[in-house]
Image (cartoon, helix red, strand yellow):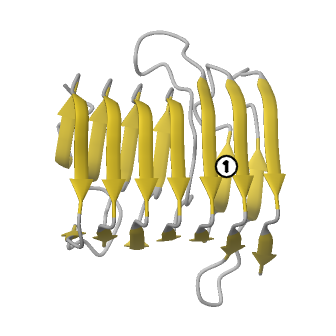
Amino acid sequence: TTYFHHALIWAEDVEHIAILGQGTVDGNFTERHGPKAIALKRCAYVDIQGIQIRNAPNYCISLLGTDWVNIEGVTIQNAYADGIDPDACRNVRISNCHIESSDDAIVPKASFSLGERRACENITVTNCYLASESNSFKLGTESGGDFKRIAVSNCVMSGIGNEPVRSGVSLESVDGSNIDGITISNCTMINA
C-alpha cells in the first residue's frame, strides 16, 4: 500500500511484535523526503524499546490504527520530519524518550487514512525530552477523528540549538475533531 511504500521497517495487520535493543536505524539522509524509519498499520501489542533513529527524512515512528503500543527509551536525533506519530491509535504509552526533530517531536493524529473516523485515545507521554523547531507536542494536524484522554507529564520541551520551538504544546482542531480529557502537567519549556 502507499502507506508503506516508503518505510525501512514496516508491518501491517500483525500482533505481538517488538523492536528491541541498542541498535540504530540510520536513514543516512541530510534533508526531508524519503522513507519512514518505522511504519506500522493496524497492528496491536507493539513494543519498541532502546533503539536509536538518526537522520530520518520522513516520520521516525509512524503508527496508523495501531493499538496497545509501548515506546520506551527511544532516542531520535537529527530527524527531518515528525518524531513519533500515533494516528488513530488507542492505548499508546511513550516514556523516557529523547527526540530532536526539525519538525514536530510527538504528534497524535486522527486522520482518514484508514477510511473511517477513528479517535486517537488513551495516550500517555511521560519523562521525555522533546526538542523541535516546530512543536514539541501537538494535536490537530490531520484531525478528522477525535482526541480523547491524553496525558503529557514530566517532559522538557525546547528548541534545537539557537532555534526556538514554535510551541511547547499546541492543541488544535484543524479538521473538526473534538478534543476531550487532555492533561498537561509538570512540563518545562525552554526557548519556546
Q: Position of residue 111 (x, y in %)?
A: 52, 25
Of 57 and 148, nearer the camera is 148
Above or below, 161 against 127 in this view is below
On the picture, is 106 further left or further right than 68?
right
The structure residue drawn at horizontal position 53% and vertical position 46%, both measured from the top left corner, is 93
Picture coordinates of residue 133 (x, y %)? 61, 71
Vertical order, 139 against 164 (above or below): above
Q: Secondary structure at mark 1?
A: strand
**Rendered-image quadrant of the N terminus:** top left
Q: Residue at x 57, y 31 (%)?
A: 142
Q: Which residue was labeled with disc 1?
A: 138
Query: Mark 1 is on which residue type?
Result: Lys
Left or right, 100 with reference to 147: left
39 on left or right of 151: left
Identify the residue at horizontal 61%, vertical 39% (top origin): 123
Residue 131: image quadrant is bottom right
Query: In this rendering, would 127 be left or right of 53?
Result: right
Q: Residues within 10 Å of mark 1 (few under 14, many from 20)?
A: many
127 to 163, vertically: above or below:
above
Q: Residue at x 59, y 81 (%)?
A: 160
- Where residue 104 sits in the image (x, y, percent)? 57, 58
